[in-house]
Image (tube, helix red, strand yellow):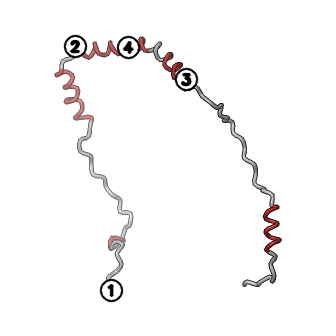
Amino acid sequence: GYQPIGKVDIAAIRAAAKNKVDDRPTTVKGAYEPIGKVDIAAIRAKAQQKPSEPEPAARPAAADDEQDNQPKSLAERSAAFSQSSQPERLTSLPKPKVANKFGGAASFGGTKAPTPG
């Protein structure tokens, strides 16, 4: 049990606490070191110059796709949806069969406390 030691010198404990050296390890410096001020306007200017080069190459490809789509009539395009989607796609999912996990504990009455009586 508890046994009092007797007189405790609180002043001595406080003095020891003031002199206590912090024995925790120093923080480890990471590889990231912030540079300071960053010129966002210059970075944006560089970023805008680069994408302007590949754009002309990408545009003709998009134009070709549009030309391919134009000759097809509406009936041809809608036929792709109406015919092929029905056999491939399940519109009604089969009911899952639930395994009887609890076995004979079918008489489980929920979480309500039994009524006294």
Q: Residue sitting at 32 percent across and 13 percent down?
A: 63
Q: Which residue is mark 4?
A: 59
Residue 41: image x %, image y %?
53, 23
What is the secondary structure assignment of the residue under circle 4?
helix
Mark in the foreground, 3 or 4: 3
Q: Residue furthest front?
A: 11
What is the secondary structure assignment of the residue under circle 3?
helix
Q: Nearer the viewer, residue 79 or 73?
A: 73
Q: Which residue is mark 2?
A: 71
Mark in the foreground, 2 or 3: 3
The answer for how far apart the CA atoms under marks 3 and 4 are is 25 Å
Q: Earlier in the sequence, mark 1 or mark 2?
A: 2
Q: Earlier in the sequence, mark 1 or mark 4?
A: 4
Determine whether label 4 and label 2 are within 8 Å by CB.
no
Q: Which residue is mark 1?
A: 116
Q: Residue sitting at 32 percent across and 12 percent down?
A: 64
Mark in the foreground, 4 or 2: 4
Residue 117: image x %, image y %?
30, 88
Rendered image: mark on residue 43: 3
Image: 100 above or below 8: above
Q: Earlier in the sequence, mark 4 or mark 2?
A: 4
Mark in the foreground, 1 or 4: 4
Q: Give the residue type at disc 4.
A: Arg
Q: Give the residue type at disc 2.
A: Pro
Residue 34: image x %, image y %?
65, 34
Q: Residues within 10 Å of mark 3 (few under 14, many from 20)?
A: few
Q: Residue sitting at 82 percent across and 66 percent down?
A: 16
